[in-house]
Amino acid sequence: MEVVEMTEKEMQTVRKATLYDLRLIFTSGEKKNYTTEELVELLDKIALAKEQE
């Protein structure tokens, strides 16, 4: 596994991008209420997608 060191600014950018990904998911969907399980599944999907980048 390759270790990548990031600056605090880069970490902040990643956090904001992840929050924006979530925002897009929530606003583009028809669903207005999510269960805890559904939220965890969405977070897992985002994490896996970012891992593959």
Image: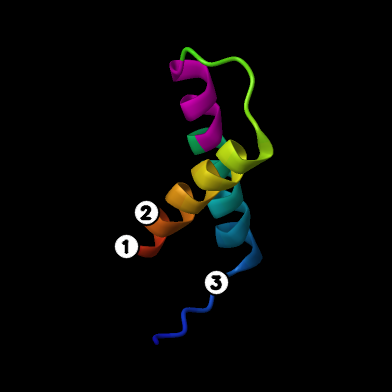
Q: Are marks 3 and 1 in contact (CB under 8 Å)?
A: no
Of mark 3 and mark 2, the one earlier in the sequence is 3
Examine the rendered structure and indicate whether residue 47 appears above or below residue 5. Answer: above
**Residue type beneath disc 2:** Ala
Q: Secondary structure at mark 1?
A: loop
Q: Which residue appears at 60% of the width and 15% of the height?
A: 32
Residue range highlighted in magenta: 22-29
Q: Which residue is mark 2?
A: 49
Query: Residue 2: where, in percent of width, then height?
Result: 39, 85
Residue drawn at the location 57% of the way across and 37% of the way down: 38
Residue at the location (47% across, 28% down)?
A: 25
Q: Nearer the viewer, mark 3 or mark 2?
A: 2
Q: Main secondary structure of the magenta part?
A: helix
Q: Front-most of 26 and 14?
A: 26
Percent coordinates x, y for residue 35 in the rendering: 65, 32
Q: Which residue is mark 3?
A: 6
- Which three-letter amino acid code belongs to the residue tagged 1? Gln
Badge 3, how many Cα within 10 Å: few under 14, some, many 20+?
few
The amino acid marked with disc number 3 is Met
Question: How far apart in space, not on screen, are marks 3 and 2 (Cα)?
Answer: 19 Å
Q: Residue under circle 1? A: 52
Q: CA distance from mark 3 to mark 1?
A: 17 Å
The image position of residue 21, as x and y in percent, is: 48, 37
Q: Secondary structure at mark 3?
A: loop
The quadrant holding residue 29 is top left
Q: Is residue 6 left or right of residue 48?
A: right
Dot 2 surroundings within 10 Å: few (below 14), some, or many (20 or more)? few
Coordinates of residue 6 in the picture (x, y in percent):
55, 71
Tell me which residue sits at (32%, 60%) in the image.
53
Residue 27, magenta (yes or no): yes
Sequence order check: which comes first, mark 3 or mark 1? 3
Question: Counting other residues with Cα less than 10 Å from the Cα at mark 1, is it few (<14), some (14-19), or many (20 or more)?
Answer: few
